Amino acid sequence: MATPVELAAMRRAIIISASGLGATSPNPPVGCVILDATGHRAAEGYHLRKGDPHAEVNALAAAGGRAAGGTAVVTLEPCNHQGLTPACHQALLDARIARVLIAVMDPTSRGEGGAARLRYAGVDVRTHVLEEEALVVLGPWLAALSHRRPVLHLLIQTDAAGNAAALSAEALAEIEIERHAHDLLISLDGSAEEGRTGSHGRGFSVPTIAVPDEPEGALAVLAEAGARTVLLAGLSNLGKQLLSTSLVDRLTLLIPAPEPSQPTTTAPAPLLPDGYILSRISRTDSQLIVHAECC
């Protein structure tokens, strides 16, 4: 069981892990908090981009000697292999961490996972701690692995009748907010740019040609780029095809806010395609912002 202090530390680790959104791909966004042997928070860290230290290593570096005998609270199972950076499970052992709490197990572990190796070394390991909450950040990365393609988010402006329309000022503002949590932003003309300019490290590239306007070619280009999350701004021909084949994972619609009382003279266009369910609704001064997910 995790203590209230450890649960609070895990929530902090989840929150700071989101700092890596739109930057870590093809790696996952991970956060870590170190508690010292007395249970006090000693340090924290997150993974910034591929090729840079992982969350555990950053947190341990900040904790220094206070990590000995302490607890590492991490959102994803520590890695068990050395790639561009050392294995995180070994870094935890070298720092003499006594206890490790993990939210989500890593499906990419090679052979025995980091949790198993830590247990073999005598570390007290607890898994699936606040797993559902950690999936708020890690969910898209895991979905991209499962689907073997990037998670796709389509944002559309509609008119009062529910038909696609030119992007409003509110839609452009929403795109400007959302883009920072995505690896790539795809415009109506198929051009691609980083969600956060210059944020990514090794293993990622921005497509230098227009993304093809048919799903198979587009997904191949996006996968080759190393993208795990992609925002499509506006309903292009590609967006229509992706939507009709349920390849859009998240859908955001901006709809002009209706009057309190008004007649309907024609049947409006369907708000959501079949297979999509509402997940959240908010509003601006003049627009409703409707979020849906493919089920």
Image (cartoon, helix red, strand yellow):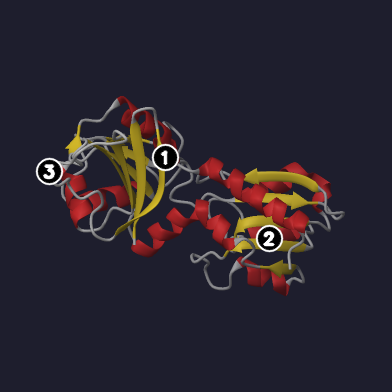
Which class describes the residues within 10 Å of circle 1: few (<14), some (14-19), or many (20+)?
few
**78 in relation to 185, above or below:** below
Foreground tag (1 vs 2): 1
**139 in relation to 159, above or below:** below
- What residue appears at the point 32 percent right and 32 percent down from the top-left corner? 171
Left or right of residue 43: residue 80: left
Foreground tag (1 vs 3): 3
- What residue appears at the point 66 percent right and 70 percent down from the top-left corner? 117
Q: Mark 1–mark 3 contact, CB under 8 Å?
A: no
Q: Residue 145 location in percent, x, y?
A: 40, 61
**Residue under pointer 3:** 266
Secondary structure beneath dot 1 equals: strand
Q: Quadrant of residue 81?
A: bottom right
**Residue under pointer 1:** 282
Nearer-N-terminus badge (3/2):
2
Give the position of the N terminus as an image quadrant: bottom right
Q: Quadrant of residue 16?
A: top right
CA–CA distance between discs 1 and 2? 45 Å
As shown in the figure, which amino acid type bears the numbered disc 2? Gln
**Residue under pointer 2:** 90
Q: Is residue 77 visible?
A: no
Secondary structure beneath dot 2 equals: helix
Q: Residue 151 location in percent, x, y?
A: 35, 52
Q: Mark 3–mark 2 contact, CB under 8 Å?
A: no
Q: Is residue 194 visible?
A: yes
